Image: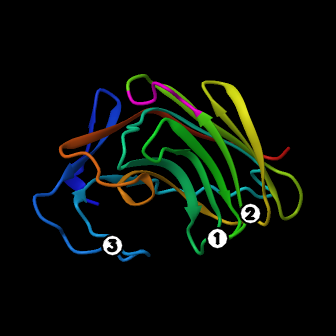
Amino acid sequence: MKQDKVSVSGGVLTLRADRLSSQDGYSTANPKPAIWYWSGAVHAKSTVVVNDQFPNWEIRGEFKAPTTRGTWPAFWLTGTQSWPPEIDILEFKGNTENWFNTFRSSSDVSTTKANVGNAASTWHQYRIWATKANSKDVTVHFYVDGDWKGQHNAAGFVGKPMWIIINLQMEGSSGSPGPSGSTTYQAQKIYVGRTRAS
């Protein structure tokens, strides 16, 4: 990820991925694919923690997300101290199907898919409502443009701090070869809210 691939103008965050003229080594993550793109990512400085003090969280944003083969935009939460937890609010893998995922482990995953046909050209809102279900578990509701799409049990997520990340990966799970030129991923109106227990 490269800092010069991130820009903000008029309240819109733009991440850009550029195809390289030659390979830039290999990824450190399995299966260690060749790196053919430089792209951008942003991470929130504050963490999301569902706990007794703040049992309810709403996280949302509006996005124009690329959906062509080889593009892999995401808006997600991941553990700051360990993995899992992971909650994917937006994740497109080279087509118009958004993947809402909750990873409890690498083999214990809940997935809900929602087709967003014009995701690349039109602003759409992606949202979660996360609430403390009991002393260990979090219930997560997923929405696109205000329409409820599914509910996952985030078992064991209570008290685990998570970063919010917006990033644009290329190829990998989204297929290859990716685009030959530049790709952009845009975000606006990002909101993170929590409710204090009464």
Amino acid type at mark 1: Ser
Category of crowding for the residue at label 3, using alpha-carbon neighbours closer than 10 angstroms: few (below 14), some (14–19), many (at least 20): few
Query: In the rendered image, is residue 195 in sight?
Result: no
Q: Pinpoint residue 171: horizontal percent, then vertical percent.
A: 35, 56
**Residue at (27%, 54%) from the top-left corner?**
39
Relative image position of residue 78 (x, y in whole percent): 57, 61
Image quadrant holding the C terminus, namely top right
Q: Is residue 20 among the parts visible in the rendering?
A: yes
Which numbered disc, 2 or 1, marks the residue that appears first in the sequence? 1
Q: Could you say which disc has been placed on residue 106 in the image? A: 1
Instruction: Report the side of 156 relative to 71 (left or right).
Output: right
Q: Earlier in the sequence, mark 2 or mark 3?
A: 3
Residue 157 circle label: 2
Residue range (magenta) = 115-120
N-term mark: 1 or 3: 3
Pointer 2 with pointer 1, Cβ within 8 A: no
Horizontal relation, residue 35 to residue 174: left or right: left
Q: Residue at x 74, y 63 (%)?
A: 157
Q: Amino acid at mark 2?
A: Phe
40 is within the stretch colored magenta: no
Residue of label 3:
27
